[in-house]
Image: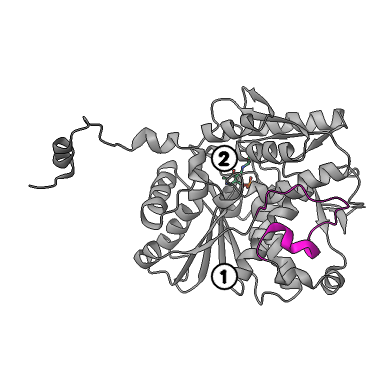
Amino acid sequence: MELSCINCHSRYSLNEPIYCCRKCKGLLEVVINDLFERLQRDKEWEKKSLSVWKYTPFLPDLSIEPVTLNEGGTLLIKSKRIAEELKLKNLYIKFEGQNPTGSFKDRGMTVGVSKAKELGYRMVICASTGNTSSSLAAYAARGNLNCVVLVPSKKIAMGKLAQAIVHGTKLVMIDGNFDLALRIVMELCSKYREIYLLNSINPFRLEGQKTAAFEISEQLKGNPDLVILPVGNAGNISSYWKGFKEFYQVGFIKNLPRMIGIQAEGASPITKAIKKGESSIERLYHPETIATAIRIGSPIHWKKALNSIYESKGYAESVTDQEIISAQRELASKEGLFVEPASAASFAGLKKLLDFGLIDRDERIVCVATGHGLKDPDIVLKDLEFERVVPDTKVIERVLGLGK
Ligand code: F0G
């Protein structure tokens, strides 16, 4: 395995502590040169139950025990009520809120933090809209590493803030958005080489995240036709695509799915580029959406994301905040799934694409619900009403309309 620049294809060893190409500053990704041999060598993996570390032949080798909280192995839930209403035969939700800290970030963090330990780092850092910081804080605690996280002030969900703090991380709020926070942590890491960067620019993070694509393929006993994901910094959609391509390369799935990226309308540079058929994005300086997790105007993985969508013959769409909130309520009230607003974007996007007639109703569709709703309860409590009455059975009978 090696690190390869996505632009000029320069190669580096997995043990070089770099995040970008020294020659052209391009992002790096892990390439597996001997996947077939690795699968031949390790036949035991197939018998293991679903989890990130089941897929060791596809993951970077480690000389230490991984720092793990048993991530992955999340449910792929077949929709009943919603699928029936929308006349869809095979609609599934991959519920990534079931990961240890309640989001898909844990898949990448177990690999990234383990690599930090292996390389001998004592301190880790990330910028975050919330979930990355919750996840890094937990894995740093587990791995006994010092941890710093930079988050935008105000626009971060309370649950995520609480998670980061309780794990003992140094949390710094900045008067600026995620894009600025990311720029600052990247500057810090190039100046202070003793700090390890664990945003998704770190190629090991995406290696862990791609295991969700493996799990979906195993859970469906074949490939899905369509995978719909919320997109922010655009690392996750790129890692799913990498995962599906690796499973396809070794013949574990017969076809590749189309990748559909969904962004919030106020933070949708990738959707805009796809709709215009362009090969680069126009950065957005003031992204806005209630789905704070994906409030990102300058996605660092834009190139890979455009590639994943074009190569897979997929599509991108944007959804309004209102559509996101309605989708969140519908998943909760009809399927029993409480997902955070950003995660509901994938389902909101599916509904929009159905309205446009862009989806075949027989296809196997997977909507990825990236994080748990409990992380951001304020958003629900702000609008939803409930009754508050005196503790008296008769009053409550009246409120419930009983015994009339
Ligand atoms: N869904 C949730 C719940 C997220 O937290 C994020 C990203 C995404 C989707 C988008 O994933 O960035 O790979 O396209 N959250 C990051 C964070 C940015 O800091 O927690 P992406």
Residue at disc 2, secondary structure: helix
In this figure, what is the number of numbered marks? 2
Give the residue displayed 38% in from the left and 52% down from the top: 330
Kindly identify which residue carries mark 1.
225
Q: Residue at x 18, y 33 (%)?
A: 392
Q: Position of residue 107 (x, y in %)?
A: 68, 51
| Crowd around label 1: few <14 · some 14–19 · many ≥20 (10 Å) | some
Percent across and percent down for residue 57 are 80, 65
Q: Residue at x 85, y 37 (%)?
A: 121
Instruction: Please name the predominant secondary structure of the magenta segment in the image.
Output: loop
Task: Please identify the quadrant where the N terminus is shown.
Answer: bottom right
Place of residue 373 in the rendered image (x, y in percent of width and height, measured from the top left): 48, 44
Where does the magenta region start and end?
Answer: 49-71
Which circle marks residue 105 in the picture?
Answer: none
Nearest to the observer: residue 1 or residue 401: 401
Comparing 158 with 348, the one in front is 158
What residue would you read off at disc 2?
293
User: Is 352 on the left or on the right of 24, as rendered?
Assistant: left
Query: How far from the left and from the top, in percent, is residue 294?
Result: 57, 41
